[in-house]
Structures are given as structure tokens and as C-alpha cells.
Image (cartoon, rainbow, N blue to C red):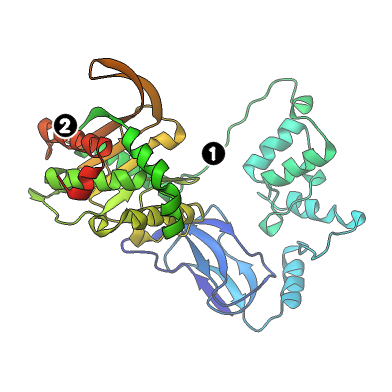
């Protein structure tokens, strides 16, 4: 019998939060095959089987926390899948999921296990059951360990053709669901409060005419994608513009450490990426040495792997400056919060056609509001305004970034 333990997932991380089990008791697993997702305060990772065999027991259920080194499951490397499934069925009185669709008379067996096991009905599923006036025993459970999931109730309702409003309690009963904060969400909350309490944060604003950048993209996007295999987006322009501005205003690439200001001659640009579990900021290391194509490829890779919980803790640590693009969600204007111990964060926003005055004439241009939140302990207003103006100039005249003037 082999113990499956929570591995070390990064320096200073001692606790993890168990996410979805990808296997259930009785399943055959291969060596290095993912078993369960674990979430830390920095990222979501997968714990793989260290030996091939059969998963015989799950000791820590989805939603619970565990410490590094804790045993969360056991694998019998000598059993076959059918043997373990039979043993698990006798031990837990739960039928294994059949390989083929079960005949109609066998289907009620699963709900009996779900309703008979304490806590087997998940809170979201119970809420839907109440809304539709259903009993847990009438719905087929497919979750790990015979648990009844929200998706099971939704599937049952769809099959029965029941409308939610038809079965709502006459009293108009309301319900609440308590869901534990994940380590990632707790860390986000803690760091945001820390930033507000320890730094003197101010935000300055400007706007940039996106005409030149949009014309460049339109002219070269096909050739760029054909040559590099990635699309030419806006982020690479802003990463390059930020680096140019950081070289001009080094205070925004520095941090306060004890009673010293640490100036850095490298530019590790963190890029905010939104996931279902929260905001993460993977870092472009030495971004000053990256080409436009390398920046776009790296950001695209970060975005894809963030949605699949494939980012590593090392990719999410560090960073000397952060760029956040709220415009992808339609944000017109916002005040981003600095990610400690950094001293600044640039906020990008939606591009909108707006009337602007140019050379005494009113014209319509694609405009973007820019926001820079900075730590006033290290950055003065003059530096902050100069920094944002430098980014505006670089975006409106991108050739400046190429010849560095």
C-alpha cells in the first residue's frame, strides 16, 4: 500500500486546499497520473500518483484543507481495478460507476447511496433540490463517493422538463450557502488589505490615443502571426512602454525594504490574469530582453495555463511592476491596487471612440484611459505623472520604443 501525500509546493507554503478529485476509489491509476487538484495561496497544482495501481481510499475530501506531508489517499499497487472496485463497494456500500449505461432498473441504486451517506448532498445541490421540490433519493448522484452534485440536480431537472419557477416554495423561502475561502482567495484578501494598510497609495490618470498602435496591428498582424505563430496584441506594446517608462522613473521599479529603497536594474513585469478562482499575476522575467513576439507568446501561455491551473508558484512570485488590463471586461476606468512590495501598477481600460481636440479640430479617436496607482512613500507626484505621460507618449508614437528616445 502506497500513501499519497501532499507534496512540497513552494517555499513557506505549509497548507493546501483540496480541490476536485480526478479519480475515485476503485479506479486504476498510472504512475505520474494526476489524482487531485490542490490549491495553495499562489496557484492550483495537481498531485500525481507516485506508483501505478488502484486508488483504494480517499482520506481528505474535496473542500478540506491539509498540510504538506499529510496522507490524503492510498494506492494499492498490487490490486487490479476490478478487485479494488468490488472491495470499495462492499466497504463503503457505494456502487462503482459502470463502464456502460446502467439499465433502468439499476439506476436508483446511486441515489440511495447519496441520500444515505451523511453530508453526501452538496450545499448547492440541496438548494436546487429545495427550489424544485425534489428529494435527494430521486436524483442520480455521480460525484466522488456517491455525493450528489449541483450538476446532477440540473441534469435531472432538464430530463424531467421541470421549470424552476413551477416548484418554488409558496413561502418564497430563501437560502444561504457558506463556502470556505480558498487559500488563493484568502491570500488575495490579505495582500489587498496589507497594501492599503502599509502603503500610501495614490492614483493618477491619463488617456492615450490608440490610433497608431491599432494601425500598426492592422498593418502587420497577419505577417506577425505567420512568422511567430502568435497574435500581435496590445499587451506587448504596454509591456514595452512600461519598461521604457521604468527606465526613466526607476522609483516605480524599486521597493522599500526595512528602511532602505532597493532599486532594481532588471524588469520583471507581472501581468494580471483572471481565473475562476481569482486573480493571479504570472511574471515575465527579464522582460526588457524579450521581443514583442516573446512577450505575446508568454502572455498567451500564461493565460491558457492559468485557466487549467498549470501555473507554478515560481511563475507567480516576484515581479517589479504590474500591468492589469481591466478593459477586457469592459472597465472604462478603475484604480488598481499595488501588489506589495512593488511600488506601482498600471491599469489599462476599454478602448472607446471619443471626440478629442487635435490641432484645433474635434475628431473621433480610439481612446483608452490609463491609471497608475503608486506608493507615495517612494514615488512623488511628479514622478508618477511623468511616468504615465511617458507611457502615453510611447503608445501614441510607438516608434519611440524602437529607437529609445
Q: Secondary structure at mark 1?
A: loop
Q: Measuring 38% from the left and 57% from the top, which residue is drawn there?
A: 298
**Residue 3, image x and y in percent?**
53, 75
Tell me if 357 is positioned left or right of 325 in this view: left
The local crowd at label 2, few if under 14, some if 14 to 19, many if 20 or more residues have their Cα within 10 Å, is some
The image quadrant that residue 142 belongs to is: bottom right
Q: Measuring 92% from the left and 55% from the top, which residue is drawn there?
A: 105
Numbered mark located on residue 178 in the image: 1
Q: Nearer the viewer, residue 317 or 197?
A: 317
Tag 2 and tag 1, C-beta contact below 8 Å: no
The local crowd at label 1, few if under 14, some if 14 to 19, many if 20 or more residues have their Cα within 10 Å, is few
Name above or below for residue 166 compared with residue 72.
Answer: above
Q: Measuring 52% from the left and 77% from the top, which residue is drawn there?
A: 50
Give the position of the N terminus as an image quadrant: bottom right
**Residue 222, image x and y in percent?**
45, 50
Tell me if 365 is positioned left or right of 71 in this view: left
Q: Secondary structure at mark 2?
A: helix
- Residue tagged by mark 2? 385
Mark 2 / mark 1, whichever is N-terminal: 1
Q: Nearer the viewer, residue 368 or 196?
A: 368
| Structural distance between the alpha carbons of marks 2 and 1 | 44 Å
**Residue 344, image x and y in percent?**
22, 41
Q: Nearer the viewer, residue 134 or 359?
A: 359
**Residue 129, image x and y in percent?**
73, 37
Amino acid at each position: 500500500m502506497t500513501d499519497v501525500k501532499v507534496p512540497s509546493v513552494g517555499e513557506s507554503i505549509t497548507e493546501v486546499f483540496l480541490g476536485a478529485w480526478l479519480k475515485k476509489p476503485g479506479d486504476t491509476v498510472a504512475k505520474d497520473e494526476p489524482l487531485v487538484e490542490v490549491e495553495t495561496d499562489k496557484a492550483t497544482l495537481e498531485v500525481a500518483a507516485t506508483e501505478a495501481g488502484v486508488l483504494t481510499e480517499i482520506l481528505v475530501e474535496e473542500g478540506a484543507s491539509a498540510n504538506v506531508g499529510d496522507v490524503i489517499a492510498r494506492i494499492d499497487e498490487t490490486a487490479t481495478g476490478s478487485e479494488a472496485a468490488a472491495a470499495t463497494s462492499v466497504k463503503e456500500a457505494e456502487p462503482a460507476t459502470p463502464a456502460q449505461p446502467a439499465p433502468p432498473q439499476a439506476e436508483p441504486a446511486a441515489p440511495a447511496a447519496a441520500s444515505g451517506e451523511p453530508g453526501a448532498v452538496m450545499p448547492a445541490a440541496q438548494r436546487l433540490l429545495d427550489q424544485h421540490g425534489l428529494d435527494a433519493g430521486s436524483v442520480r448522484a455521480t460525484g466522488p463517493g456517491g455525493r450528489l452534485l449541483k450538476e446532477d440536480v440540473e441534469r435531472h431537472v432538464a430530463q424531467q422538463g421541470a421549470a424552476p419557477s413551477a416548484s418554488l416554495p409558496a413561502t418564497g423561502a430563501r437560502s444561504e450557502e457558506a463556502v470556505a475561502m480558498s487559500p488563493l482567495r484568502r491570500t488575495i484578501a490579505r495582500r489587498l488589505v496589507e497594501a492599503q494598510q502599509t502603503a500610501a497609495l495614490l492614483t493618477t490618470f491619463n488617456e492615450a490615443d490608440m490610433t497608431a498602435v491599432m494601425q500598426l496591428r492592422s498593418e502587420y498582424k497577419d505577417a506577425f502571426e505567420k512568422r511567430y505563430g502568435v497574435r500581435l496584441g496590445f499587451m506587448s506594446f504596454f509591456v514595452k512602454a512600461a519598461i521604457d517608462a521604468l527606465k526613466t522613473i526607476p522609483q516605480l521599479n524599486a521597493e522599500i525594504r526595512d528602511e532602505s529603497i532597493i532599486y532594481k536594474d532588471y524588469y520583471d513585469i507581472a501581468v494580471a490574469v483572471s481565473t475562476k478562482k481569482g486573480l493571479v499575476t504570472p511574471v515575465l522575467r527579464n522582460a526588457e530582453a524579450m521581443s514583442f513576439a516573446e512577450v505575446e507568446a508568454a502572455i498567451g501561455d500564461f493565460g491558457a495555463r492559468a485557466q487549467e491551473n498549470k501555473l507554478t508558484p515560481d511563475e507567480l512570485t516576484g515581479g517589479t511592476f504590474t500591468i492589469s488590463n481591466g478593459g477586457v471586461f469592459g472597465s472604462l476606468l478603475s484604480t488598481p491596487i499595488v501588489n506589495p512590495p512593488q511600488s506601482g501598477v498600471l491599469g489599462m481600460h476599454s478602448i472607446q471612440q471619443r471626440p478629442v481636440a487635435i490641432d484645433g479640430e474635434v475628431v473621433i479617436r480610439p481612446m483608452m484611459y490609463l491609471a497608475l496607482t503608486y506608493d507615495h512613500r517612494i514615488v512623488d507626484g511628479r514622478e508618477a505623472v511623468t511616468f504615465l505621460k511617458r507611457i502615453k507618449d510611447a503608445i501614441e508614437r510607438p516608434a519611440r520604443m524602437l529607437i529609445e528616445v
